[in-house]
Image (cartoon, grey):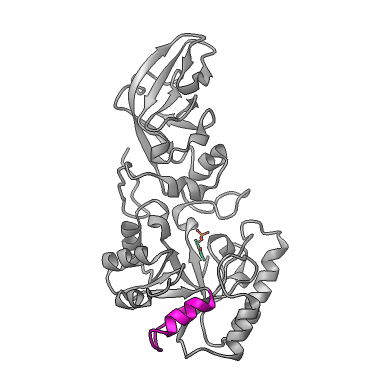
Amino acid sequence: MADPALCAAVVKANGYGLGAVPVARALAAGGCRMFFVATLDEGIGLRQAIGEGSEIAVLNGPFARTAAEFLAHGLIPVLNHPGQIEEWTGQGTGHPAILHVDTGMARLGLTAREFAALIDNPPPPIPWRAVISHLACADDPGHPLNESQRARFTAAAARLPGIAASLSASSGIFLGPAYRFDLVRAGAALYGVNPVPGRPNPLRQIVRLTAKILQIREIDSGESVGYGAAHVMAGPGLVATVAVGYADGWLRSLSRRGCGYVGGVRVPLLGRVSMDLATFDVSAVDPAQARPGATVELLGPHYGVDDAAADAGTIGYEILTALGARHHRVYHEPATTNPPE
Ligand SMILES: *Cc1c(COP(=O)(O)O)cnc(C)c1O
């Protein structure tokens, strides 16, 4: 989609919860040569894991007296405000950095006035690796801010001729070629989150989450299940208690709304999600499949990251980045191989 722009991979927040190191190693093996993380610590960890072959940029940029750490680990800071530019040039000139200009997000990046001052009164020369900005409404193609941000960014980039320009993250890539410039910064789309909400997901689901059934219980009509007695059985049924809870990122807001799948059969989540456990109605499942030790599929082809997000009242990004440290992460070779059942 990004072609002919270069595609950098955003692997902040531990690779959106999936594991920054294995994700980045796989992407590097697939030809990715530029990574973005959020923090200096993430950058140092990634550099140690993937070696020298790729560029690593740090979106949050340097705090005071951290520029030397960036240099020591070969990290490229994104400079978001004049203080960061000062911190960087204080380490001497000749060290590449990325300039962030704000075009309407009002979060990070030089304001229009700060950018004009930079052009009129340049600091000691910085070899700019790129000039970037970030779209506020890229997931809503009809939003007028997209076009105005694109126009402001085009004007800003024109003041820095010959420097790679980068405006779009995942959703921006899908706004069309005019939004792709020289470099795109794909995060969520790499992990299967739908970059075009409300339309069919053009990307494959790559994350599958399963959890084990600990216990099956027969419950009579009128009995309640779980904390707060939040679910009362309308009829007799079978309830599976599953080893996943909000401490694992199976969000408490999925209480009474989420679901899982056992043997391809939908099993509704009953009552409240607790810290380490959740309960599912497995009355409709073949008892040979719903037994202690069997697995419930929580994310997968039937119920994807964006489906869970809709039920939890959030976005796919939060479902992924919430995935907890207790999950055992297993990585499969790309494309042709299917995960074992
Ligand atoms: C997180 C982030 C990205 C990646 O965004 P996705 O929507 O996940 O593709 C790109 N650029 C910046 C500045 C970001 O903060």
Q: Residue at x 45, y 71 (%)?
A: 61
> Does the magenta run of residues contain 65?
no
Q: Position of residue 178 (x, y in %)?
A: 63, 72
Seen from the viewer's position, the closer of residues 113 and 292 is 113
- The image quadrant where one finds the C terminus is top left
Left or right of 130 on screen, residue 197: right
Q: Residue at x 56, y 88 (%)?
A: 161
Which picture quadrant has residue 250? top left
- Left or right of 133: which side holds 74? left
- Between 223 and 21, the residue placed more toward the observer is 223
Q: Is residue 85 above or below residue 174?
A: below
Q: Position of residue 267 (x, y in %)?
A: 47, 26
Q: Residue furthest toward the front? A: 64
x then y, percent, for residue 181: 56, 75
Seen in the picture, residue 323 relative to 81 is either above or below; the reply is: above
Question: Is residue 259 depicted above or below 91 in this figure?
Answer: above
Q: What x and y, as percent, mark residue 151?
A: 68, 75
Above or below residue 340? Residue 3 is below
The region drawn magenta spans: 81-98
- Residue 94 in the magenta stretch? The answer is yes
The reply to whether residue 165 is in sight is no
Depth order, front residue of 195/103: 103
Residue 91 visible somewhere in the drawing: yes
